[in-house]
Every structure is written in C-alpha cells, then in structure tokens.
Image: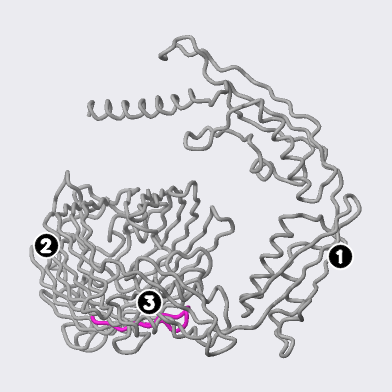
Amino acid sequence: MRQLWTCLFGLVLAVLVGCSSKLDDVRGSDAYIKDVQFVGVERFTEAELLAYLHMGETSVLPWKDRYAFLPANIPVDAKRIVEVYKAHGYYDAEVVSITPHVKAGRVRLFTRTPGERAPGKATIKVVVREGEPTLVEAIQLAFPDGRPGRQVPDPKVSEDALRTRIALQTGRAFEVPKLNRSVEQLLETLRDAGYAKADVRESAEVSPGVGARVRFEIRPGPYYKIGEVRFEGLGDVPERFAANEVDYAPGKPYSPKLVKKVEAATYGLEVFDTVTIEEKPSESKPGTIDLVVKARPAKPQSIKLGVGFGLDPVRWEQRGTLLYTHKNLFKNLTRFDLRARAGYAELPSMFNPQEHGPVVKLEPTLRQKGLIEKRTVASLSPAFELGIWEGYQFYSPTMRAGLSRFFSRFVEAELAYNFRFVDFFNVSPTLEGQDSILGLDFRDPYTLSYLEPSLRIYLTDSVLRPKNGAILGVVYDIMGLGGDFSAHRVRPSVRLYWTPHWRITFAGRFEMGWIVPYGAKGGAPIDMRFYLGGADTVRGWGLRRLSPQVFPDGCIPGDADCRGIPVGGNTMILANIEARVRATKMLSFVAFADGGDVRAGVNEFALNQFNYSAGPGVRLDTPIGMFRLDVGFRLNETVYALGQKIWAVHFGLGEAF
C-alpha cells in the first residue's frame, strides 16, 4: 500500500511540475493576460469581441489556450475593434483607451535558475465608445432574368419565402456578416428547390449614420431534376445492391441535400473507403442532372482484439475479446461478424470469490440487406454461451433469425424467431428447494422457442446519437411455440432527449415490463425474468440485485452473513433522468437519478416500495468508443435493500440509454 501511495504522489508531482514548466514559455513576454475588462461595450458579449482579437483571458486549466501580454498587440487590437464595429454597422465607434496593468510574478526558489520570477499577471481595461448604428432602410429583391417558377408558381421560392431567408431586417443595424449569410441562405433555398445553377449577388448603398439600402439580384437559372444515378469503381460490390440504396433519387427535384443523402447512403454500405459524386447535366434528357457515384472499395475483412474487465459491486470479470468482420462475404454484400469473448468471473469480487467460473461467448452473425426485399435486412445468429450468475452456472446454445425493415426514416420494425437450450450446473441448493416463489420457472435443463416482434419509432434528430426528440419502442416476446414455457413478455419504453445548449443535454427513459404466463406450461425461465440494478438501469444497486430473492434455510435477510439469490420477477418498472454536460470534445460530466422496482407477481406494483438512487458520472469519448464511470447512491430503504451496500460503482461502454 505504501508503494501505491508513493507512485500516486510521484504521478501528481510530475503533472504539477509539467504544468508549471509550461509557464516558462511566454513567447517573449513576462506576463500572461488573466482578465480583459470592456467598458462601454453593449453590442457584443466579452467572448464575441475577444474572438476577433489577439488578446484573450488565460484559463487556470492547463489544457486551455494561454495569452501572453505583448504591448505591440495593443494598437493592432484597437484597430481590430474599430473594424469589427464597422462590419456590424457602427461606423462612428472608437477605442478611447486600452490600459494594461501588470502584476509581477513571484520569485521562484526551486528552479534551474534560482531567483528568477514566474510570469506575471496582466489585466487589460478597454474603453470603447460605440456610437449609434447605421440602420437598414430598405431591402430589395430583383429578378433580372425572371422569377423562379414563373410558369408554375413554386411556394418554396416565392418572394415571401425568399425574404424569410434574409438575415438583415429593416430598422435594424446593417451588418456585413448578416449580408453575406443572406446570400448563402438565398442560394441554399434556390438550389434545394431544384435551381442548381442559381446565382445571387448583393449590393448595398451605405450612408454612415443615415441608413443603408440593400439589393439582392437573384438569377434562378433553369429548373433541374435528378436523372440517372451511375456507379463507378464498385469492385466486388454488385451494382444492384448499391442502386437499391439510392433508388429514391431519380426524378426528384435536384438539391445539394439530396446529393449528400445519396453519398451518405453509399457510404452506409460500409464497404467503401471513399465516395465522391460528380454532377453532370444529362445530354439525352434536358432539365436533368445525372449523378456519377465514384467509389473506392475498402478492405472487406478486419480483426479487432482487446482485453477488458467488468467491475460491479456483486461481480468482477476479466476477459479477452475478438471481433472478426467480413463486409462482403460471397461478394453479395453479406456481412459476417464473429464475436468471441472468453474470461473468468468472480462473485461478488476477486478478493471474495464466493462463486467463480469461466465465461465464454461465441456469436457468429450473418446479415444481408435485399435478400428477400430490397429494404429488408435478414439476419441469422447462432451462438454459444458458458456463464455464471448468482446461484448457478450454465451453458446455452441459441439460435436467432430475424427480419427488420425501416419504413421511412422514423419507423423500424423487426420480427425474430429465437430458440434457446439452457443447462444449469453447480446450482445452489437454495434454488432447487424454492418451488414456492419460482414455481415452474426453474427447470433444469429447459428449451424455449418464441417469436419476438418489435417496433421502434425514432422522432429524433439522429438514430445513433440523439440530441433532441423521442424514441418510442415496444418488444413483445410470444413464448410457447414449443419448449418448456409459455408466456407473453411485453416491454414498452420511451426515451426523451433535449439539448437547450450544445454543451448540455437532458435525457430521460421510462420503461415497463410484464410477463403473463398462460397454458399448462405457463411461466418464464429464471434467466429471462426481469432484473434491475447495474450500470444500465438503477445505478445505486449491484448487477441484478434489485429483484425478488430467495434465501437459504435459517438465513435472516439483513444479517451480515445472509446473502440472497436474485430470481427475477414478472413485473418491472424503470425510470431514469440524466443531465449531460460536455466539458471538452472528449470529456463530459453527468448527474443522474434512477428509480425502479421488480415484483414477483403478475401485474403487481408496489409504488410505496419504489427504489431510488442518484449520483455523478464521467464520460470519456474516445476513437474506440465512449467509456462510462458512474457512482450511484441509494436514496431510500426498501425490503430489497436489506443487506445491500448503500452505494455502487459502475464502469460501462456508451451511454446508459
């Protein structure tokens, strides 16, 4: 332990020395700018004005930019301030004064040159007289070659619609950035409406202090539609599969957004390194633009190896992983993924291994789009798993075959057939003797055959990383198509996202679950019942610990030596809310609150026993994925909390939801 603390102290000392040594480089200056004070500035915020200047405020954080105090920059920044104001309509603005105040740094005793001074701290006071802005008096739209859609009026490019795209407003300050942005937005509107060769030119008559008259000359040019979409450089990829991805484009009005969508759809096949699109006016069909998609095939095969560990209050796991991928098997865009994982698990921890054993999972998956219908994805995934949970170990060969399809951008439907065989071993006597709570739900071994239809509705800005919107979903398992169990298992859910500022995202999730047995074999296997707790559900609890439990004979819940075995339940309710704050491009902080409950009975709820937890978290977004660390604290005591720790640490990959 002493060696550990020595290493940690040495690491902290090295970081501090490293950070302090950076202060020696002041680029010819003897002080850093710590504070810039603006007096008389109302048009801009401090950050907006500093973005145009050499001067800036040095942060206390070592990875932020440093700003050296250089007296030669003062007259340069004074001119810049005046020019910035002119560009935003303030032609009479002037810099009254820029006054620096420098405080000398302390004397350093423990450096290579004892007695030298550390860089000082400079405060700069900038006094500005803004004056009155020059206002826009009139905005004129001129169409020298005629209006767009003059034969058949097009509401998307009517004069009223175009005026909404002009950033300048009459009665407001005349600003050059808004003038330039107006041109860009007018061009964007025209080109997105099919006018591929549109041209917009701006002019302005400005009388400083009096007013500005702005004129936009708009030449829409001819109207175009998308003609043929041709492909070059596909290599071993069959053209019909690539054509299926973009068959919506021919005949649509031309727009740069549609061209980008075609490019993204071709990239989405995941078999090309680069994709570029060349636009060519059709020689055979006037008024159309053909798209030539030029691709360069990527290497179809890849192998990724890794090692990792899982850390939970009730389970530790060390593992190695392998992922082999072939993206164009059989040269017909069949994707083959082989995921393999092998390791060893200790419950509840490596230092207290009351139960332990090997963990193995082998999961090959074949997936192809267009095998049955050009928008439908077919998948086949046989798998084998050797695992351990509290109270038992098991091995299980499984098979999953599914069909999924997106209906528009928003709706995804899937139908899957699943077959499972599970054989338990090293089963705790506590489970084998607990017929009263488990009933027929513990059968050793068992087979299960079931259908799994599911539906997801994406009302979000992104399917993979949503920032705003909602995702609605429901999964329905119909057990009883043969095998040892028959039950309905339903899990509806809703996820909500709101990003009021690019640094802050609020996310919420609400999910429920019911298992309803039916028939002579009514029930659900112990490993498919509902459990909560762990990194992805209620984070103040250990993995699967928020659940009904069974206890050995003579064991009194709450005693230090009494440890129950979770057996899951037939009714579940889960709620989460998170505030995610982005500090840097890679680093984010999270505050979360979770709640949930699991009950053994069918359609049984006990809201007075609802379990709450909350805590902080950290996210590190790296090129190989997002790493997550959360610390959850239980906020209340319920019957399930007896003998449980009041806090839990969780590591994970990706967001919790």
Single out the mark in the foreground, 2 or 3. Answer: 3
Q: Is residue 543 above or below residue 224?
A: above
Within 10 angstroms of label 2, few (less than 14), some, or many (20 or more) residues? some
User: At label 2, which amino acid type do we have?
Assistant: Ser
Q: Is residue 547 above or below residue 416?
A: above
Q: Is 403 a magenta residue?
A: yes
Return the mark for residue 138.
1
- Give the x, y percent position of residue 423: 10, 72
The quarter of the displayed image where residue 569 is located: bottom left
The quarter of the displayed image where residue 98 is located: top right
Who comes first in sequence, dot 2 or dot 3?
A: 3
Residue lying at 80% horizontally and 73% vertically, measured from the top left: 142
Q: What is the CA distance from the residue labelled 2 to the residue labelled 1?
A: 84 Å
- Assign the C terminus to one quadrant of the image: bottom left
Residue position marked by numbered label 3 in the rendering: 232
Q: What is the CA distance from the residue labelled 1 to the residue labelled 3?
A: 50 Å
Single out the mark in the foreground, 1 or 3. Answer: 3
User: At label 1, which amino acid type do we have?
Assistant: Ala
Residue lying furthest front: 283
Who comes first in sequence, dot 2 or dot 1?
A: 1
Return the mark for residue 428.
2
Residue lying at 42% horizontally and 81% vertically, measured from the top left: 230
Q: Horizontally, is 221 left or right of 438 in the view?
A: right
Instruction: Using the image as rendered, state which of residue 58 and residue 593 is in the foreground.
Output: 58
- Give the x, y percent position of residue 591: 47, 51
Q: Horizontally, is 203 left or right of 296 in the view?
A: right
Region in magenta: 401-413
Residue lying at 24% horizontally and 82% vertically, measured from the top left: 401
Q: Looking at the magenta stretch, what is its main secondary structure?
A: strand
Q: Are marks 2 and 3 in contact (CB under 8 Å)?
A: no
